[in-house]
Every structure is written in C-alpha cells, then in structure tokens.
Amino acid sequence: DVKVTQSSRYLVKRTGEKVFLECVQDMDHENMFWYRQDPGLGLRLIYFSYDVKMKEKGDIPEGYSVSREKKERFSLILESASTNQTSMYLCASSFLAGSYEQYFGPGTRLTVT
Amino acid sequence: GDSVTQMEGPVTLSEEAFLTINCTYTATGYPSLFWYVQYPGEGLQLLLKATKADDKGSNKGFEATYRKETTSFHLEKGSVQVSDSAVYFCALRANAGNNRKLIWGLGTSLAVNP
C-alpha cells in the first residue's frame, strides 16, 4: 500500500527555534511537496522537489527552506520559527509523469508559542 | 494564471440528500482535473479525476464530469451518508508550462447529519 509518513502529528515549538519537519515516501516518487493548510486559505504550496537535491519555490517560501538528500525523504526547515507559522503542514509525493496523482501524509500540526 | 474556484462552505445536508459542490476553473488548453477529500484528522486523498473533456470520474458514489464548454467539474452524489462528512478540494494540473504542481481550490466543508 502506498504510504507517505510524517515525523510528527503534533509539534509545539518556541519562537526563534529551528524546526525540522520530515517526510518519507515509499513509492519511489520523483516529486515531493510541502504545503501548509490554514482555515479559509486552503492549501498553499511552500516548496517542491522534482529530484534529489533539486527544489523549486512554491507560492509562500519565505521563512522556510527544504532539503532533499535522498529520493524518499523531503525535509521542511523553519530556520527561526515565528507564531505566524503555526499551521497544519502537509507533505505529498507523486510520479514525474503519468496520472500525476499526489499522495498525502497525515499532516503535522505545528504550534509556535 | 490558472485558477480554481469552488463554492464556499460549509455545506450542511441531511443523510440521503443529494450533493452538488461546484467547481470552475481557468486554464489554457485541456488541464487534468481532480477532486480530493480530507476526512477529519487526516491528509488528503484522491477521490476522482478526469483527464480530458467529457470524461466522467467516479468513485464511492461520487461523480464529476469534465465540461470544457463551461470550464466546470462539479462534484455530485445522489445520496450522502454521515461518513461523507469531510472537506472536498477541487484541483487542476495544467497541460503545459510548469505543470509539476497542482492548482487548488480553497476547499468546501461538508457536514452530513443523521
């Protein structure tokens, strides 16, 4: 069965901390994505990656960075967490071609205090 | 640029009622169209898709038809159940340009009462 896993379901961090969110997929997908989901704003793309060590900015990359050292793993990094980064973070993956269906992890609810 | 517009929620229905959630899009050419569903406390999962005009996607009693002439992909179900309570997202993938990513609607929350 297809699986995307995220390192934590719930996370509480303090303002100014460096935060790492990890995502792992077991489907050999080329593409991986990080979204944040906020009430009334839907899904907003932060960054995506289409290959190891390759990345592209999404719609709201400010305050975030990413790392993809291995094909199955895509990390989202908050260099200095702020309260306005409190949100639900969703990771997804897909093949580079074909139906392009995205498979999602369960999400990480991050609270920055 | 490309965009997706969904009807605003929340939508509240009684069990066995008919459901329609409207979705219209703006895109050049023939994009692929998707409906995703997010059940409480979970990530999103693909509900159905259509990749060319007049295609009908269907799954779990839900249907949507790709209408090029009206640029629409409305989601319908004849008889909803309490277990259908979720947030529904319409999305498109462009068929040209930077089409590695999906363009998302804002989501429509559905609550079904017994």
Image (cartoon, coloured by chain):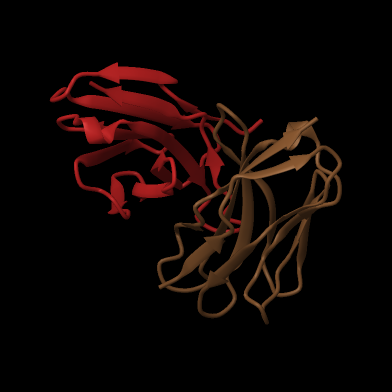
Chain colours: A red, B brown
Above or below: residue B2 compared with residue A59: below
Question: Taking the image as drawn, is residue A100 in sight?
Answer: yes
Question: From what the image shows, is residue B110 above or below residue B41?
Answer: below
Residue in the foreground of this view, choosing between A106 and B72: B72
Image coords of residue A38 (percent x, y):
40, 40
- Image coordinates of residue B53 in percent, x first then y, are 70, 75
Can residue A8 be seen?
A: no
The residue positioned 45% from the left and 57% from the top of the image is: B101
Q: Residue at x 86, y 41 (%)?
A: B16
Query: Image check: B69 left or right of B54?
Result: left
Q: Which quadrant: the C terminus of chain B?
A: top right
Report the number of discs.
Answer: 0
Q: Answer with left or right where residue B100 lies relative to residue B44.
A: left
Q: Position of residue A74 (x, y in %)?
A: 36, 36
Looking at the rendered image, the quarter that the N terminus of chain B falls into is bottom left
Question: Dividing the picture into quarters, in which one does residue A88 lie?
Answer: top left
Instruction: Look at 43% across and 44% down and name the residue there.
Output: A32
Q: Which residue is at a point 57% across and 59% down the rendered structure image? A: B6
Q: Is residue A19 left or right of residue A95?
A: left
